[in-house]
Image (tube, rainbow, N blue to C red):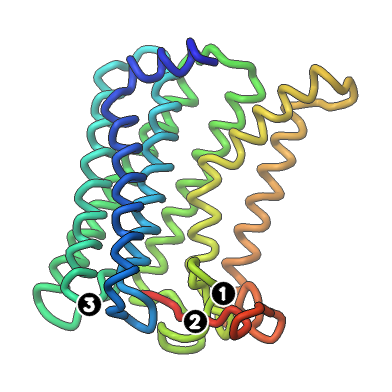
Amino acid sequence: MTELLNDLWQNQKPLILAGIGFLVVSGLFASFISFDSTQILGINRWIKPIKFSISASVFLLTVAVFLYYLQGFEKSKNVIAWGTLLIMVFEVALIVMQAARGTTSHFNVAKPFDAMVYGAMGWLIMTNTFLLVYLTVLYFQSDIKLPNTIIWGMRLGLVIFILGSIQGGYMASQTGHTVGVADGGQGLPFLSWSTIAGDLRVAHFMGLHAFQAIPLFAVLMTFLSKQISFIKPTTFTVIFAILYFSAFTFVFAQALLGKPVINQKYLTKNIEQGKVYINE
């Protein structure tokens, strides 16, 4: 494992450094909450930069692993690595800028400058999606030196990630993430997913994190198959991917129907039943 991590560090240093950097930045934003109580749509303005910094970190570290195992295509790998890295830097920077200005970043077209920022974010994410589509194509073409189960886990994770990105495009076209009421209202702690109406961010979250969940499941099945004879790792991984996609589709449909993933009346917490507010 140490040797693998050392090799990964040597081969994908920019992405790993950026991933670590985003984690450090998320901690910095978390410290701001202790002395800055400014709110945007009912929540502290630094919550969103924290979430997106963590998300960018996980994404870039995952891309680093995928590129590490991709054989050949060195020029393409460099384009994908630097493209995704720069896109995440600019995307999070725009979110932080809007938070510092005390306004929303997503779906904000109230003023020309805000509309320009939101449009730039859209182009950045669309470009990022194209880069991941290209990575997906390469993963179906390249000879990858990994067990077949893990290869298929990575491929299927990429495919569902792309679907999650497309669903995100649909959400952007609606100029809002809540279905049934205006954005803003009661939601789950930190995640802020609506507990009173449909929330398109739930499916978006699931789709994007198939990028990690399905490959990790494939790794687990590969390990367990060596201990338990009846486990067919590739078959189990494909079944898991199908179930994951089904869950992704279900929560998307649920949101379109205006139904929350967890209804407020079932959400019980010790302090005010865990009531928080949705961010943009």
Q: Is residue 179 above or below residue 87?
A: below
Asked if the residue under mark 2 is in contact with the one under mark 1, i.e. CB atoms within 8 Å, the reply is yes
Place residue 7 in its image quadrant. Answer: top left
Q: Which residue is mark 3?
A: 103
Mark 2: few/some/many CA within 10 Å (<14, 14-19, 20+) = many
Place residue 258 in its image quadrant. Answer: bottom right
Give percent across and percent down for residue 222.
Answer: 71, 23
Which quadrant is home to the N terminus? Answer: top right
Asked if the residue under mark 1 is in contact with the one under mark 3, i.e. CB atoms within 8 Å, the reply is no
Give percent across and percent down for residue 234.
Answer: 72, 27
In space, the residues marked 3 and 1 are separated at their CA atoms by: 25 Å
N-terminal of the pair, mark 1 or mark 2, is 2
- Tell me the mark number nearer the camera, choosing from 3 and 1: 3
N-terminal of the pair, mark 3 or mark 1, is 3
Q: Secondary structure at mark 2?
A: strand
- Amino acid carrying mark 3 in the image: Thr
Give percent across and percent down for residue 156.
Answer: 57, 37
Q: Which residue is mark 2?
A: 179
In the shown orientation, is residue 74 left or right of residue 236? left
Mark 3: few/some/many CA within 10 Å (<14, 14-19, 20+) = some
Residue shown at 66% from the left, 79% from the top: 270
Q: Is residue 267 above or below residue 166?
A: below
- Amino acid carrying mark 2 in the image: Val
